[in-house]
Amino acid sequence: MPTTDPYTPAGACMGGCNHRNRTTWAAYQRAVEDHADQIDTWFRNGQEGEPPAEPDQPTIYWKPGNPLFCERDIAATRRSLLELDTQAAQLAATSDGHRARGGGGDGRVSGSKTSGSVSPAADILDRLVGDLFDVEDEWRSLRGYQPRPTTPVGPRGSHPRSRTIGWLADHLADILAHEDMTGLPRKVFNWERILRHLNKDARPSTSSPIRCPRPTCGERRVAWDDERHYYACGACGNIIYETEHDEHEREQAEAADLARLESSLPSAVAHQVLTPGPRDDAETRTAGTLPVVDPIRIDPDTLRLILRAPYNRPLTEAEILTLPWPPCPSCSGSIHVEHTIVERAGKAAATVGGRPLPAIAPERHAMPKFWRCIGTQDEPACGAEGSA
């Protein structure tokens, strides 16, 4: 199993969150090697003229690992690992065990003289279970655990597969903390991609409907990267894992619904507020309550400032100074939120299809950028900070 990436420094996360950093650093290393060759050529030519300029070293902010992978990568790997059991069960249920799923195939490669497999789907599932068994056996051997239990009916089947996946998911954080197991996330992502392809369960489109959640971006250029198993913004490169993407999609949909409800109705529609009359609502409301979620909070794991409805929308400069900012999650002190101003140009009045459209005035919005702890009156700041 692959162990290390030559372009990832010690202490940095070895997962997909640092892929762009690794690509940038690899390009810089190649530029350094090319510069060395150019210097050699310059010396051989008698040092004529100015020496070749050195490449500029990029400024890279590496996401830290804990110790080898960050919590986001571990969570993405665990989600994909558990999905393998569902996809494998679906493939086994839709395959008759005698023909290649999808029709037309006999399990042979073009030009092969040997007979094809009786059940290509079963062969693929056997290879999946075999890979999972190898990972479990290797980890049991590294930690000195008891050997993997076997069943009387044989090593293959849905029960051994589910048991091994559950065991690996339970020990995943410890497994990904070992330098000999760093290739496991890529192997898990590859298997999920293969099974989804065989089940015809792939995403119909790689484009995402959400806007980039980074306050300085907000573009609708978020797309799924099937190879690295996350969403990425094509404008700013922001990486969004599947769980985070689903949360942003839900929040942005709630904000859009709220904006539609708060927007004024057209003048042609006579709107009348409906109020309940006496004794119209006698039903008790004590049967259950919804969980209370703070509209503005700081994620204790990622230290990211999260704005939910009704605040996950363009804010004015006056609003952002008076928002009920949450306390610091480390020391419960006050926080200071830096913001940036985004200006959107207006539009002049126009006529489309004989219908006049009103002019749109230019807008000036304030977007949270990052936050930092400023302490309390009695205690100094603890130094905690995070992005928005």
Image (tube, helix red, strand yellow):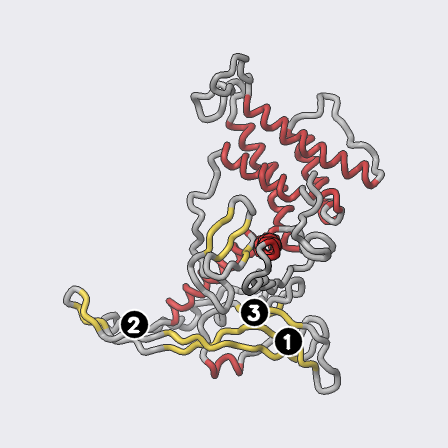
Q: Quadrant of residue 263?
A: bottom left
Q: Is tag 3's residue or tag 2's residue first in the polypeptide sequence?
A: 2
- Identify the secondary structure beneath mark 3: loop
Q: Nearer the viewer, mark 3 or mark 2?
A: 3
Q: Is residue 177 left or right of residue 33?
A: right
- Identify the secondary structure beneath mark 1: strand
Closer to the camera, 157 or 261? 157
Q: Residues within 10 Å of mark 3 (few under 14, many from 20)?
A: many
**Mark drawn on residue 271:** 2
The three-letter amino acid code for the residue at tag 1 is: Arg
**Mark drawn on residue 226:** none
Q: Which residue is mark 1?
A: 372
Instruction: Residue 258: give x, y in percent of width and height.
Output: 42, 67
For the N terminus, which image quadrant? Answer: top right
Q: Which residue is mark 3?
A: 388
Q: Residue furthest bottom?
A: 377
- Image height check: is 96 above or below 171? above
The three-letter amino acid code for the residue at tag 2 is: His
Q: Nearer the viewer, mark 2 or mark 1?
A: 1
Q: Quadrant of residue 355?
A: bottom left
Q: Is tag 2's residue or tag 1's residue first in the polypeptide sequence?
A: 2
